[in-house]
Image (cartoon, helix red, strand yellow):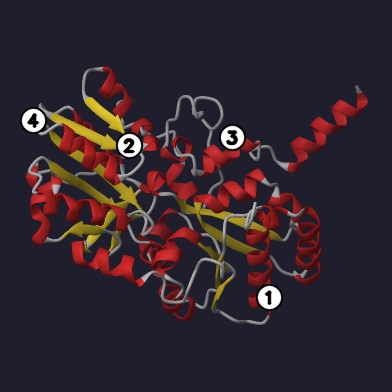
Amino acid sequence: MKYIDEFREGKLARQIAANIAIEADSERRYQFMEFCGGHTHAISRFGIVDLLPDNVQMIHGPGCPVCILPIGRVANAIHLAQTSNVILCSYGDLLRIPVNNGMNLLKAKAQGADVRMVYSSTDALKIAQDNPQHQVVFFAIGFETTTPPTAVAIQQAQALGLKNFSVFCNHVLTPSAISHILQSPEVRELGVIALDGFIGPAHVSVVIGSRPYEYFAEEFQKPVVIAGFEPLDVMQAILMLVRQVNSSRAEVENEFTRAVMPDGNMKAQSLVAEVFELRRSFEWRGLGKVPYSALKIKSAYADFDAERRFQISEFSIADNKACECGAILRGVKQPRDCKIFGTVCTPENPIGSCMVSSEGACAAYYRYGRFRDKNQVMAENSCQQSV
């Protein structure tokens, strides 16, 4: 299959791995953060860590919109779903995020709330058209990738004159979060890890381009390489980061040239700017309050803003005390550092959002067995050979 099979070629992977091993200075450590959960899953699924030298370490970042969504916003959505005459439409992963009492949208649905899983914002719009007697709320989340479709739905609702459709907006912005990780005193108090560079998100960059990363590459002197999600994409990005570090460069490079342009998708950006504006602050799970890191619906489209229509109040709820999702999202800890990982907390019974999402770090570790360290794997192999 074009642009997939070519980027899963084993011979090329071994060649890139050999180049990384040769070029990575054995006298130093390299620590790179992959911001996007898609990269985390590629690294786990294809065993990329096993192809890297021991002094090149990959660190998980915030990962995915489901992972970073604060519990208070999920509680808001559950309350909306339980409101009389409301149909709440949501993406599938969101249905399973637990709040502090174990409640989630799936359980709310089981108790009688009208919660419906959708694949797109236009699905929610169609439900509103088909159910004029109900208020239909679309629980919108996502980085810059999913924001334009939400804007389209709002504009279409306005054009159709729908009075029963609104959006609970939780769209967030990637560059602001990366800057916050690098400079926020609040995050540093929660734990600090030295980072030498970032693998920039792929789909987000298709929309916003590569230019938005230039500020913190220069300001914080951290290289960024935008990469696709196939294994050779990720490995080539790691090699490019190693080369930047070795030559004391801090630039934005684009490995994903088959999809990402410097200025991104201008039409999508224009559409987003028409419908949304910046929030002064927004809470990210694991990062706390991040300034100018999220969007809200402009007053021109206030009729379709669920926060205004239902007077949704903002409040914070602490994570489960046993859950380490916050530290994992900051890269301070790995999933296997969490005491409840793989025991109490599993994909079938997620305690934290990192285990809920199909792109979450904990889900990746659990699904692909990456939670076992090398010593454990060697011991298991030794036992099998002796038997």
Which numbered mark, 4 or 1, is in the foreground of this view?
4
Relative vertical location of residue 256 with respect to residue 374 in this rendering, above or below: below
Mark 3 crowdedness (10 Å alpha carbons): few <14, some 14-19, many ≥20: many
Q: Circle 3 is placed at which residue position?
A: 366
Q: Residue at x 62, y 56 (%)?
A: 58
Mark 2 crowdedness (10 Å alpha carbons): few <14, some 14-19, many ≥20: some
Q: Circle 1 is placed at which residue position?
A: 243
Mark 4 crowdedness (10 Å alpha carbons): few <14, some 14-19, many ≥20: few
Q: Residue at x 24, y 56 (%)?
A: 151
Looking at the image, the residue that sits furthest to the top is 111
Q: Give coordinates of residue 28: x percent, y percent.
A: 71, 69
The disc, 2 or 1, on the residue closer to the chain's N-terminal end is 2
Tell me how far mark 2 sits from mark 3, CA to CA: 26 Å
In the picture provided, is 383 more to the left or to the right than 339?
right
Question: What amino acid is at disc 3?
Answer: Tyr
* Element at label 2: loop
Which numbered mark, 2 or 3, is in the foreground of this view?
2
Q: Residue at x 62, y 58 (%)?
A: 3
The disc, 4 or 1, on the residue closer to the chain's N-terminal end is 4
Question: What amino acid is at disc 1?
Answer: Arg
Evaluate whether residue 141 shows in this view: yes
Tell me how far mark 4 sits from mark 1, CA to CA: 60 Å
Q: Circle 4 is placed at which residue position?
A: 133
Q: Give coordinates of residue 7: x percent, y percent.
A: 68, 57
Question: What amino acid is at disc 2?
Answer: Val
In the picture provided, is 186 more to the left or to the right than 222?
left
Q: Do labels 2 and 3 touch, CB within 8 Å?
A: no
Mark 1 crowdedness (10 Å alpha carbons): few <14, some 14-19, many ≥20: some
Q: Do labels 4 and 3 touch, CB within 8 Å?
A: no
Tell me how far mark 4 sits from mark 3, CA to CA: 43 Å
Question: What amino acid is at disc 4?
Answer: Gln
Tell me how far mark 2 sits from mark 1, CA to CA: 43 Å
